[in-house]
Amino acid sequence: MSLSSFAVGRPVSTLMIFVSLCLFGIIGLTRLPVELYPDVSFGQVSIIVYIRGGIPPTEVETQVSIPVEEAVSTVSHLKSLMSISKEGEATIVLSFEQGIDMQLAAMEVREKFAKVKNKMPKESEKPIIAQFSQTDVPIVILAVTSPKRTQEDLRILVDEKIKERIKRIKGVANVDVGGGRERKIIIEADKNALFRYQVSLNQLIAVLDGNNLNLLLGELRQEKTKFLIRAVGQLENLDAIKNTIVLSD
């Protein structure tokens, strides 16, 4: 019996089939979830560690980034590993192969990180281990402009005041700052002067680096108060750079 013969010969059954299909369609349509973005994982897990006291990037790399990299580099199905060391902040991004269970991967990353957690500097804040997905796009994007302030001043204002206040808000996971211009001082070396005083370019760079340090030396405890002891030796202005002794007798 063909489909047309069945439909003509049994109209009631045919009507019931079509009504059932329409009913299932309506039920499925009402229960279909609506999402702005599909729930697709990027296959990445990020470890973010903030360090109080303004530790320079070089120390952040040696004390935080490198130990964490060595600890999590043996995670299963790891595709690539990248770290970013900034002043007072270390970010390690782990990229995994496609098709794996990211929940299990994140759990393994936490287990590996727990082995070096106690070796972090005492000034380290509670680390953030985040699994990024398509739905984790920024919920707020702010632009800061001023008719009076320069781009360098705006960048300092955002980094030192606005960013820290937003990070203290409950529920905020991370705040990234982009754009603007950071204040930089460009030093041009005189080749003739370097040759005359028998100073190499590497020596000049080493002297400037050695006189532009901000190191944490230790801490002083007094009852319930803890004081951090730092050796502040950063070059803050042009006069400090001009008065730097490059070669002494």
Image: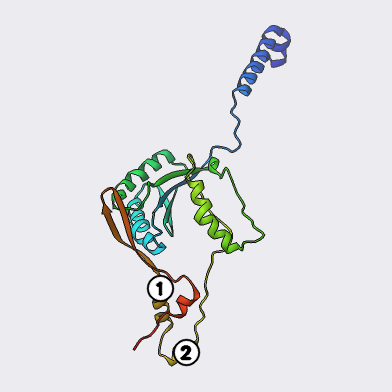
Tell me the amino acid under the disc marked 2: Ala
Quarter of the figure that contains the C terminus: bottom left
Q: Quadrant of residue 198?
A: bottom left
Question: Closest to the observer: 185 or 153?
Answer: 153
Which numbered marker is on residue 209? 1
Is residue 110 positioned above or below 149 on the image? Answer: above
Is there CB contact under 8 Å for labels 2 and 1?
A: no
Is residue 182 positioned above or below 51 on the image? Answer: below
Q: Going 38% across and 85% down the picture, which residue do you hit?
A: 247
Q: Is residue 24 left or right of residue 164?
A: right
Is residue 163 positioned above or below 59 on the image? Answer: above
Tell me the amino acid under the disc marked 1: Asp
Q: Going 47% across and 89% down the picture, which residue do you hit?
A: 193
Quarter of the figure that contains the N terminus: top right
Q: Quadrant of residue 129?
A: top left
Q: Examine the rendering and report whether any part of residue 101 can be seen.
A: no
Question: Closest to the observer: 35 or 234?
Answer: 234
Q: Is residue 243 left or right of residue 186?
A: left
Is residue 112 positioned above or below 14 on the image? Answer: below
Q: Examine the rendering and report whether any part of residue 236 can be seen.
A: yes
Q: Which residue, as the protein is rendered here, is positioned at the far front?
A: 223
**Local crowd size for mark 1, using a 10 Å CA cut-off: few (<14), some (14–19), many (≥20):** few
For the residues marked 2 and 1, what is the alpha-carbon distance in whole angstroms?
20 Å
Which numbered marker is on residue 249? none
Question: Closest to the observer: 190 or 24?
Answer: 190
* Residue that badge 2 annotates: 193
Q: Going 54% across and 42% down the picture, which residue do you hit?
A: 134
Q: Where is residue 66? Give x, y as percent.
A: 35, 58
Q: Where is residue 24? Give x, y as percent.
A: 62, 18
Q: Going 54% across and 67% down the picture, which residue do you hit?
A: 183
